[in-house]
Amino acid sequence: MLQGNFSGFSLEVGTDEAGRGCLAGPVVAAAVILPKNFSHPFLNDSKQISEKKRDELRPFIENHALTFGVSFVWQQEVDDINVLQASITGMHRAIDALKITPEFIIVDGNKFRNYKKIPHKTIVKGDAKFQSIAAASVLAKTYRDEYMAKIHQEYPMYNWQKNKGYPTKAHRNAIREFGATKYHRKTFKLLPEQLKLKL
């Protein structure tokens, strides 16, 4: 059972990201402030629920949240600043996009940088513990999946519509056959046998 609130502040924002482990595409982060009485029967960590349920949840979250923000950190920036910094930067930008300033921030994971002067708490597996982080995980995942399906049209041979840029065997075989695209992260080990990627 997900908890509604960690800090006791009514304007508590939950934040999470999607796409850290991918070989291609952006890291997408979201931040959500939910009202006190929010509930939905199948809200959970986005990895625990089906794509169909995530797609149903997204408009419900957007319509019922007090405010939400979503941000994309593109693959070039992921390469420039590293994936951990990209995740934290994305979460900061998602909080920047909120229409209401939060009083407290709860973060999925164990790493974060201070955001302005707002207190925060990192929570390992927070997306399976707190509603606002779970809601942020659903928004981050659905926005990212939608984008990967869009760029799949441009490069269908990598099957991003299905693998979303994660390092599946089929994705790696496509990289082996067709090489890397502008959407691939150049600092990631795209193929296990490559020590250095020549692009």
Image: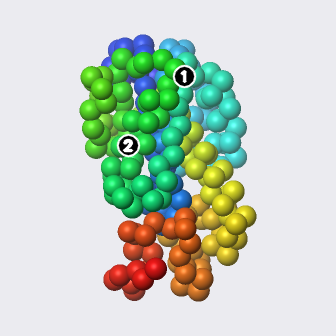
Residue at screen point 57% across, 34% down: 43
In the rendered structure, are the residues bearing label 1 and label 2 in contact, judged by CB atoms less than 8 Å apart?
no
- Residue shown at 40%/20% (left/top)? 102
Mark 1 vs mark 2, CA separation in Å: 19 Å
Classify mark 2: helix, strand or loop: helix
Residue found at x 66% / y 50%: 146
What colouring method underlies this structural image?
A: rainbow
Q: Which mark is residue 38?
A: none
First in residue order: circle 1 vs circle 2: 1
Residue 51, image x and y in percent?
Answer: 65, 49
For disc 2, the neighbor class at 10 Å (few under 14, some 14 to 19, many from 20) is: many
Examine the image and state in which quarter residue 190 appears.
bottom left
Q: Residue 36, image x and y in percent?
A: 50, 14
Amino acid type at circle 1 is: Thr
Asked if 84 appears above or below 41 in the picture, the reply is below
Residue furthest to the right: 153
- Kind of residue at badge 2: Thr
Give left or right: position of 109 versus 15.
Answer: left
Residue beneath disc 2: 89
Give the residue at x 36% y 17%: 103
Q: Position of residue 114 (x, y in %)?
A: 26, 32
Please say whether residue 194 is visible from this viewpoint. Answer: yes
Which of 77 and 148 lies nearest the eye of the viewer? 77
- Using the image, tell me which numbered label, if any, was put on residue 67: 1
**Residue 122 location, quadrant:** top left
